Amino acid sequence: TLLRPDATEKDIEALCCEAIRHNFHAVCINPCFVPFAKKLLKSSGVKVCTVVGFPLGAISLKTKIFEAMEAMLDGADELDMVINIGEARAGHWDSVRKEISNFVIATPRIVHKIIIETCYLTDDEKIRASLTAMDAGAEFIKTSTGFGPAGAVVRDVAMIKETTGGKIGIKASGGIRTLKDVLSFVEAGATRIGTSAGLNIMKEVSLRD
């Protein structure tokens, strides 16, 4: 993952090389770099993931759909969309469901991950947001943007897995820096890990072997 606002093409190139070397599933980058990364990763098997409504989620549905469709046309394989967190906090779940459903329908043949930004939600809201994302047709629930006041929490991942019964993927992201972190989240139920510390974690793996 490389979502820093000061990232350059040189940084993205290094990220892609790292992903190819370690056979990572995907790189997660800002939308402006999708065409560039797509060319670099051609025939590598590494997917291109980008973000929608990032990092606040507080833009209109029309704008999110435009961002998503543009990213798809640019070559993105996976899209991570931030929900309207204020609507979730207000209990407007029909609105949240409509947003996610329209996002999924507008971008077929793409993997859709819904960022619920757990650090802002109560446990009941985390449960409701997870069920809403699943019911609306998303393939993954993602815990965090990494730009909020806190990142992924093992307890939240375990709760989401229990709530959804393993019927939807769970991406833990935000503050995951070590191999120990990765193993803890996987044990709790995460099926995908988002981290900007991939290289350091792989070094830990090699030392362990």
Image (cartoon, helix red, strand yellow):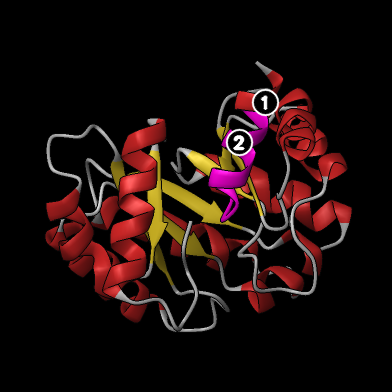
- x and y percentages locating residue 3 in the rendered image: 47, 69
Q: Residue 152 lies in magenta, yes or no?
A: no
The residue positioned 55% from the left and 40% from the top of the image is: 134
The residue positioned 71% from the left and 73% from the top of the image is: 148
Residue 79 shows in this picture: no
User: What kind of residue is marked 1?
Assistant: Leu
Q: Is residue 163 above or below residue 166?
A: below
Q: Quadrant of the C terminus?
A: top right
Judging depth in this view, the residue of 13 and 52 nearest the camera is 13
User: What kind of residue is marked 2?
Assistant: Lys
Residue 1 shows in this picture: yes
**Which residue in the rendered view is the most extreme toward the front?**
207
On the image, numbered disc 1 is attached to which residue? 207
- x and y percentages locating residue 154 in the rendered image: 83, 41
Label 2 with label 1: CB-CB less than 8 Å: yes
Left or right, residue 7 beside residue 182: left
Instruction: Give the residues in magenta.
Output: 194-205
Density class for disc 2 (Cα within 10 Å; few <14, some 14-19, many ≥20) is few
Q: Is residue 119 above or below residue 101?
A: below
Judging depth in this view, the residue of 141 and 179 nearest the camera is 179
Q: Residue 201 lies in magenta, yes or no?
A: yes
Tell me which secondary structure the magenta stretch mostly adopts. Answer: helix
